[in-house]
Amino acid sequence: MDVDVRVLGRIEVVERLGDGPGPARRVTGDDLPRRARQVLGVLAARHDRVQSKDALADAVWGEDLPGNHAAALEHYVSVLRRTLQPGVPTARSFIVTRAGGYLFATDRARLDLAELRTAVRLAEAQPGRADVRELIVRLAVDLPFGEDEYAEWAAPARAEVRAAVVGALLDLAEAEAATGADPARVQRLARDAIELEPFAERAYRMGMRASAALGRPDEVVRWYDQCRRALDQELGIAPSAETAALLAQLRDNPAPVHDRRRGDRRRPVPAPAPEPEGMRGPADAGRLAVVRELPTVPAPSERAPHRPPSSEAESHRPASSFLGREAELRVLAHGPGIVHVVGPAGAGKSAALGRLRETERATVGLGKGPGPGGALRLGWLRTVLRQLHAPADAVLDAAMAERRHLTPGELDDIAERIEGKTVAVDDAEHLDADSVAELRWLRERGVRVVVSYRYPSGIAGRPLGELGADLVLRLAPLGAAELDPATLERSGGIPALVEPGPAAEEAAMHLARQRTRWMPPAAWEILRLTAALGSLRVEQVAAVGGFDVDEVLAAVDQLVHAHLLAEGPGGHVRHRSGLVRNAVAAQISAAHGHQLRTRLTAG
């Protein structure tokens, strides 16, 4: 094979022009049209599997499909073939046409992501192979598809690589700790793992042990405190019993520096056990029902920063202003067995589930999905069981330490204690296959399940798509029917800004940052331009900001979808919320504003 395709980091395609280490021709992702690069990225992420034109178009364009998406795809595939392998016949291209779709054939081009996946499979089959884990770390110079890191199609591959690298780093750290030869290297490996996955308790424990081996008791406490803060601030939970016990042990019985007899000699974590019979049956795809759209409520992640409750009594206080939703809450509390709650960022999914938990404390437990890294796999279930006064920490700690699913016996015991109650999981799109199988098992034994995520298309091809649903609740933004004109103009219908409190502009800026953090840099600049200059046509935004019109259109689509911009007649866009507009405008100096107005007039 004469072509190397590299997607770990930013996309680069290298074609060798002769035998051996001679001259080579390089094409980067920036050299390709944006849509062509995304087509290549989707095919690489799903290499050696045929992608139908419909599936490929849905991944690349989402809800903004062009009129003739099949023809558009054929055009971009042709561009890729001509650009990446000029002069090579279509029959020999690594982008293969098959069964009415396309696939990336790794027998025709090397792909670093495919090599990484092969190494991961080998590492799982041979737990003692440190060299394979070193290879994983070397291959993964960065998470894949850096140009499109916020694209939904890229998220599963990025999460997969993150989990693989974190696992390899911690396996290497554990092997190094067992020898007792270099505790400092153990610390470095643990820090690298935490940088990728801040919720990986195993990494903190490795750091604590290494610090104890180096004779640094204060550092042991710092590792634990860092773990505690990360879990509390992001997930609202405390470190596991195993981590707390390790802190007490190392405080009471510090190991002598470099004492091999007291080193961590645990065996490597075994590969996952075969899953129990019946835990992965196919979902009933015909059980989806969409009910009427719902008004929104403020998502907790988008409220102004707040202090965690200092007591159990304080944590039970109801939310200050929840707008209606009584019928919907009754459905969530007493409806069918599996309910999906969907809607765009800020549609109020988190707040609706939070309100459900507040009003049904005896029967509803609410956990948060693991996020893209997935290292804290059972954190959602730990939280739910504690809330329902049915903790199973020892079982969950054992399953997470051994990297296995819960056994049927363990699940039956849990289900018996919470039968008839509701397990709710917010931000559930990144639940892995084991977690989804466990939810399905609980449901079959009388436990209700509620999950929330952004879009049904976002779980296509993900494990959560196999859960099935009896009902789908789709949340919509607030509008004139819920708010008076002045409040609607000020808040833009964004629930978190309806009653923002005394620090209104601070809350608005925090919200805008939250909603744009997954968007390309152009999105924030467009918010700044429209805050400084008012309503603008797309071509004016492109001219003043120095962007391509296509780039502006893509960013505007995302900003409108996030309810930060509103579209007007004649192709104009403007801020939807007066509070957000004022908060962003306050960050622009008078001199900069004058320069922008001059450029707009000159254009």
Image (cartoon, rainbow, N blue to C red):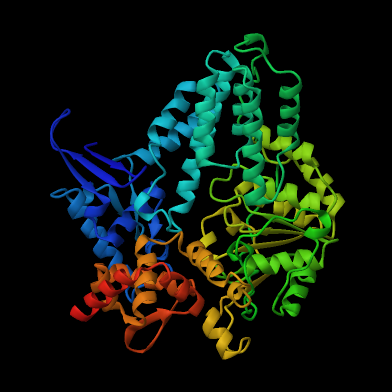
Residue 113, located in which quarter of the rendered image?
Answer: top left
Number of dots carrying numbers: 0
**Coordinates of residue 414 in the picture (x, y in percent):** 81, 47
Q: Is residue 378 shown above or below 261?
A: below
Q: Residue furthest front?
A: 590
Q: Nearer the viewer, residue 441 or 31?
A: 31
Q: Is residue 129 visible?
A: no
Residue positioned 54% across, 13% down in the render: 181
**Coordinates of residue 150 in the picture (x, y in percent):** 43, 57
Q: Is residue 545 visible?
A: yes
Quarter of the C terminus within the rendering: bottom left
**Coordinates of residue 389 in the picture (x, y in percent):** 85, 51
Residue positioned 61% across, 86% down in the render: 483
Q: Nearer the viewer, residue 544 or 552?
A: 544
Q: Nearer the viewer, residue 279 or 365?
A: 365
In the figure, is residue 589 to the left or right of 137? left
In the figure, is residue 129 to the left or right of 596? right
Quarter of the N terminus within the rendering: top left
Q: Is residue 112 shown above or below 501?
A: above
Q: Is residue 387 shown above or below 171?
A: below
Residue positioned 43% across, 53% down in the render: 154
**Coordinates of residue 438 in the picture (x, y in percent):** 70, 49
Residue positioned 44% across, 26% down in the render: 134
